[in-house]
Amino acid sequence: PTTLPLSDTDPDSTTPQDYIVGVAPGTTGVRLKNLAIDGSGASPTFTSCSNDFVGVYFHNASGTINNVRAVNIALPTAEASCREGLAFYVASSTGQTSTVTMDHVRARRYQRNGITCDDAGTTCTVTYSTLAGDGPNHNVTQNGIQVFGSSATLSHNRVSLDSYTGGGLGNQSTGMLVQNAEQVSISRNVVFSNDIDIYAVENPSLGLVPPTTGTWSILDNTVSQATDAVPGGAPGNGYGDGIAVDSTSGTVNVIGNHSSADT
């Protein structure tokens, strides 16, 4: 599209979510299959950071996404530093649920996140999918897959090239970000060339704290080439880690992973 006439609310902010494909609250059983979604035509309509740009949005809704490719979900160059631009977004309002299964999903040239699964009522299953960030960039931190306050199963995915050159504590990009999550299983993925390949952290000050923190399992993944792309280096700021587990009070199982060539 060249315009985005429809938008929805975001459970976690006041920012309107302008989407290309939206699954309305209360809808279940939706199947998106064999689609190519390109945001390049609509990108010029964004002139500030006031609205988020979403490729596919499931809000209080459930279904499956199979063999769907989302590209160019990014604001124009003048707004490249906005923390907006989500290729796939699944979110749940308080007391509501969203359950989405994704397989063979692909995302490239997203501004902020490839796949975003937020909120306590959200459950995502992501398998055999490919997410690739922009490589080292100075505009905004990126995440291939973000699990924030929700539950997720992530397996057999390939995630790479999320890297931020601006430096600063907490400004790392990640391949897979698990934050204040419920039950999470991350297994048999290939994750490489991100500031942190897999980052599991509990930080209540960021919000979206679930009623309970379940077990986080990080099993049999291959991570490599995590990079510190900051000119001159950013020692101690969380760059160049293959797998990082930070400050969680819950059970974390890190078993059978292979990490190599991290800087």
Image (spheres, helix red, strand yellow):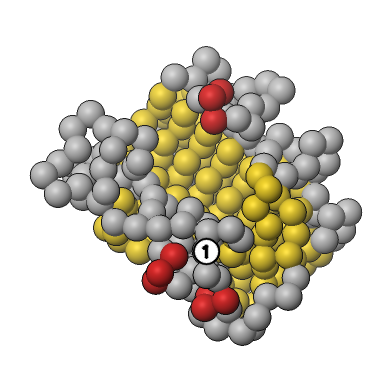
74, above or below 221, in the image:
below
Quadrant of image for the C terminus: top left
Q: Residue at x 30, y 45 (%)?
A: 195
Answer few, some or many: residues within 10 Å of disc 1's Cα (few below 14, many 20 plus, some between 14 and 19).
few
Q: Quadrant of the N terminus?
A: bottom right
Disc 1: which residue = 48
Secondary structure under the numbered disc 1 in the rendered image = loop
Can residue 127 be spotted in the picture?
no
Residue drawn at the location 23% of the way across and 29% of the way down: 236
Residue 202 drawn at (x, y percent)? 51, 25
Estimate the x, y position of residue 10 in percent, counting from the top left: 70, 50
Q: Is 7 situated left or right of 39 in this image?
A: right
Above or below residue 165? Residue 235 is above
Residue at (75% x, 70% y) in the render = 6
Work out whether residue 68 or residue 17 is closer to the camera in this orientation and state it: 17
Residue drawn at 42 percent across, 52 percent down: 142
The x, y position of residue 122, in whole percent, is: 71, 42
Q: Quadrant of residue 213?
A: top right
- Toward the viewer: 197 or 221? 197
On the question of residue 150 being in view, the answer is yes
Amino acid type of the residue that numbered disc 1 sits on in the rendered structure: Ser
Residue placed farthest to the top in the image?
249
Can you give x and y, in whole percent of width and height, for residue 21 in the image?
Answer: 70, 70
Image check: 106 left or right of 259? right
